[in-house]
Image (cartoon, rainbow, N blue to C red):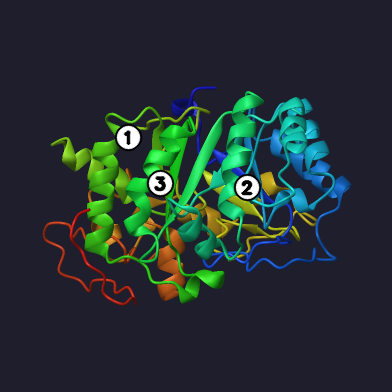
């Protein structure tokens, strides 16, 4: 089905299932605050299969991302990929760069029908990446897994966190993304949840300059670029092209996902214990899959429905002419104000004529100059 034909009131573009919070790494930004041991109340294999069956009720080819923690900390991860594939789902995974990610495991995921492997790079060298990930050897393990994915014929996605600690590394990471033959670079602008609360976000003006650089880079890069928790990247791109605010102009990446989705509006997250959130970075539960279908929660819960109404937004996001194209990060608004419908403090754009209060982002001021 064409992404343009998908009604986000009825189904998400992306459904994330956090298989586990267990992980050998101790990454500085970890939303899940992962730890080495698995939680005793994780969804079981059978409960997971029921969740995947329910995901199929959203419609043909539903995209499912298996995340963590490290999803490979579960012995049934490959089996769940195969189960979801057999159920008609497009299964992808975001494993950690650890010893669990062996060539045999990558090959098994490919054989099980995995559509894409997403790996994280937060530095352009072993020293910078490993320091951020809290584990020596993580960089080399990630690079090795990326090459294993290529050998197995698995499309590769690279995920990168943007914060004060990593922003200067972006050009070097861009070179790695190209060298590894990735099909997509997903650039995540920090939301202060989990361990990420101790990191320093970039200033709004610096974020804007990074998005301008990403827009320019995307024009010649041999891979796609998307942002996570920074939907105003679309505004930056449109304004950079000298265009005004469109009513609707979805673009797609290589697996048919429309850009510009936001928490609860085209996106849903199921935690390791079954709680359904609009996003992993907006941990406000709308129900639990052990008690209610994920389809029913996504379509009918008051929280999800409010997040899909651009006219319900408050502050300058509610007054912005780009609110249907962008909508702001609902996760970041929630992290800073406790209100997921409030304005996104990372966006420096002020709509013409808006004279209300501007959101404030708590951060140590960073150099706002362009790269």
As drawn, the label of residue 290 is: none
Say left or right for 138 vs 223: right
- Which mark sits nearer the N-terminus, 3 or 1? 3
Secondary element under disc 3, as helix, strand or loop, is: helix
Secondary element under disc 2, as helix, strand or loop, is: helix
Q: Quadrant of residue 359?
A: bottom left
- Give the residue at mark 1: 248
Q: Quadrant of residue 200?
A: bottom left
Say left or right for 319 vs 363: left
Q: Answer yes or no: do the residues labelled 2 and 1 have beta carbons within 8 Å?
A: no
Residue 263 point in image, percent of width and height: 49, 53
Q: CA distance from mark 2 to mark 1?
A: 41 Å
Residue 224 point in image, percent of width and height: 40, 33
Number of marks in picture: 3
- Which mark sits nearer the N-terminus, 3 or 2? 2
Secondary element under disc 1, as helix, strand or loop, is: loop
In the image, is residue 87 above or below residue 158? above
Q: CA distance from mark 3 to mark 1?
A: 31 Å
- Give the residue at mark 3: 173
Mark 3 residue crowding within 10 angstroms, few (<14) / some (14–19) / many (20+) = many
């Amino acid at each position: 089905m064409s992404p343009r034909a998908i009604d986000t009131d009825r189904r998400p573009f992306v459904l994330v299932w956090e298989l586990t919070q267990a992980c050998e790494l101790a990454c500085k930004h970890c939303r899940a605050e992962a730890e080495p041991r698995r939680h005793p109340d994780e969804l079981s294999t059978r409960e997971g299969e029921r969740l995947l069956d329910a995901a199929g009720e959203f419609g043909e080819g539903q995209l499912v991302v298996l995340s963590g923690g490290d999803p490979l900390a579960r012995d049934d991860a490959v089996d769940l990929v195969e189960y979801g594939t057999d159920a008609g789902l497009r299964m992808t995974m975001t494993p950690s760069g650890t010893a669990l990610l062996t060539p045999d495991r990558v090959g098994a995921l490919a054989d099980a029908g995995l559509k894409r492997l997403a790996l994280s790079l937060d530095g352009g060298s072993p020293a910078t990446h490993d320091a951020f990930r809290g584990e020596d050897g993580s960089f080399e393990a990630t690079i090795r897994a990326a090459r294993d994915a290529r050998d197995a014929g698995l499309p590769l996605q690279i995920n990168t966190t943007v914060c004060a600690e990593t922003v200067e590394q972006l050009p070097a990471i861009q070179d790695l993304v190209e060298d590894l033959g990735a099909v997509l670079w997903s650039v995540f602008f920090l939301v202060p949840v989990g361990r990420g609360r101790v990191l320093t976000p970039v200033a709004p003006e610096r974020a804007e300059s990074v998005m301008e650089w990403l827009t320019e880079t995307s024009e010649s890069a041999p891979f796609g670029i998307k942002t996570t928790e920074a939907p105003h990247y679309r505004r930056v791109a449109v304004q950079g092209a000298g265009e005004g605010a469109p009513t609707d102009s979805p673009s797609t990446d290589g697996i048919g996902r429309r850009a510009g989705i936001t928490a609860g509006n085209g996106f849903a997250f199921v935690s390791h214990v079954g709680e359904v959130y609009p996003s992993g970075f907006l941990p406000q539960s709308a129900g639990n899959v052990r008690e209610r279908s994920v389809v029913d929660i996504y379509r009918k819960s008051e929280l999800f429905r409010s997040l899909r109404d651009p006219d319900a937004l408050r502050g300058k996001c509610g007054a912005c002419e780009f609110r249907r194209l962008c909508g702001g990060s609902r996760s970041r608004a929630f992290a800073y104000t406790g209100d997921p419908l409030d304005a996104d403090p990372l966006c420096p754009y002020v709509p013409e004529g808006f004279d209300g209060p501007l959101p404030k982002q708590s951060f140590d001021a960073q150099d706002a100059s362009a790269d």
